[in-house]
Image (cartoon, rainbow, N blue to C red):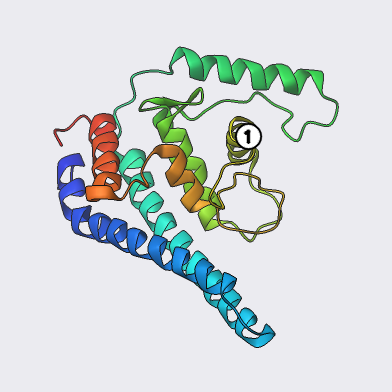
């Protein structure tokens, strides 16, 4: 019977491999950007732009796959310890905004799912909620609107980091794009030096699953 430890062990090769690919595509994107700046004709520029775009999509898909593995780990095996003070404050502020607005999409009470209120706080939200919203945005990026909970998380991240560098974005209203890599950056899982991205991922999940790294 699978448990938290066996899940981490069985998914470790895939997760570690994805982080390796992510690092590789990070360098490819940098090279593609350099190629754009060195284009000597309109045809060459268009070719390099297409290469840059496809490289960017590949990186986002890899990041989204990492979020999917993390999401399943938390959904199935995380050990909730109750909502943090920051999480409760976040809920109360969103509910206050709902009460004060006549155009709020959500008419009932806003609540964060307790199963995903796990891990260290990132901008007043539990790490598990960042994974939750990031995974859902990845799976439903082509939809006109995400569910309210996911939008609220992304809007909060966008308010904290309105203009992140290196092409990152949490703005859901700038077109139908993946934001998976931006979410990994918010989680602190993108530092590829000496495989630190994978180690940070493993450390965070081990903490919420209450198993040894």
Q: Position of residue 201 (x, y in %)?
A: 29, 42
120 left or right of 153 in image? left
Q: Which residue is drawn at 41% across and 60% down?
A: 26
Q: Taking 34 as reference, is 160 above or below it?
A: above
Query: Would you say 192 lies left or right of 161 here?
Result: left
Residue closer to the observer: 106 or 169: 169
Circle 1 sits on which residue? Answer: 152
Q: What element carries label 1?
A: helix
Q: Which of 66 and 162 is in front in this view?
A: 162
Q: Is residue 206 above or below residue 96?
A: below
Task: Please provide percent x and percent y for residue 131.
Answer: 44, 41
Tell me what residue is drawn at x 20 percent, y 53 percent.
12
Residue 120 vs 6, above or below: the answer is above
Residue 196 at x, y = what percent?
Answer: 26, 44
- At x 59%, y 30%, the residue is 160
Work out whether residue 57 can be spotted: no
Q: In this view, does 188 lie to the left or right of 167?
A: left
Q: Position of residue 212 (x, y in %)?
A: 13, 33
Local packing at callout 1 (Cα closer than 10 Å; few below 14, some 14-19, many 20+) is: some
Q: Which residue is drawn at 25% across and 30% down?
A: 207
């Amino acid at each position: 019977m699978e448990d938290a430890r066996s899940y981490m062990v069985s998914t470790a090769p895939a997760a570690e491999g994805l982080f390796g690919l992510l690092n590789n595509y990070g360098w490819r994107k940098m090279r593609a950007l350099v190629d754009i700046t060195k284009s000597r004709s309109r045809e060459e520029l268009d070719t390099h732009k297409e290469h840059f775009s496809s490289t960017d999509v590949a990186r986002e898909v890899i990041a989204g796959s990492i979020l999917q593995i993390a999401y399943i780990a938390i959904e199935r095996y995380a050990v909730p310890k109750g909502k943090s003070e920051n999480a409760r404050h976040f809920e109360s502020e969103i509910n206050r905004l709902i009460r004060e607005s006549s155009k709020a999409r959500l008419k009932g009470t806003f609540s964060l799912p307790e199963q995903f209120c796990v891990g260290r706080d990132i901008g007043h939200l539990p790490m598990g909620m960042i994974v939750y919203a990031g995974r859902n945005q990845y799976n439903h990026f082509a939809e006109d609107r995400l569910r309210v909970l996911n939008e609220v998380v992304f809007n909060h991240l966008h308010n904290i980091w309105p203009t992140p560098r290196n092409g990152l974005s949490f703005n859901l209203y700038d077109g139908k794009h993946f934001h998976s890599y931006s979410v990994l950056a918010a989680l602190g899982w993108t530092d590829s030096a000496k495989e630190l991205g994978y180690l940070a991922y493993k450390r965070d999940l081990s903490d919420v699953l209450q198993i040894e790294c």
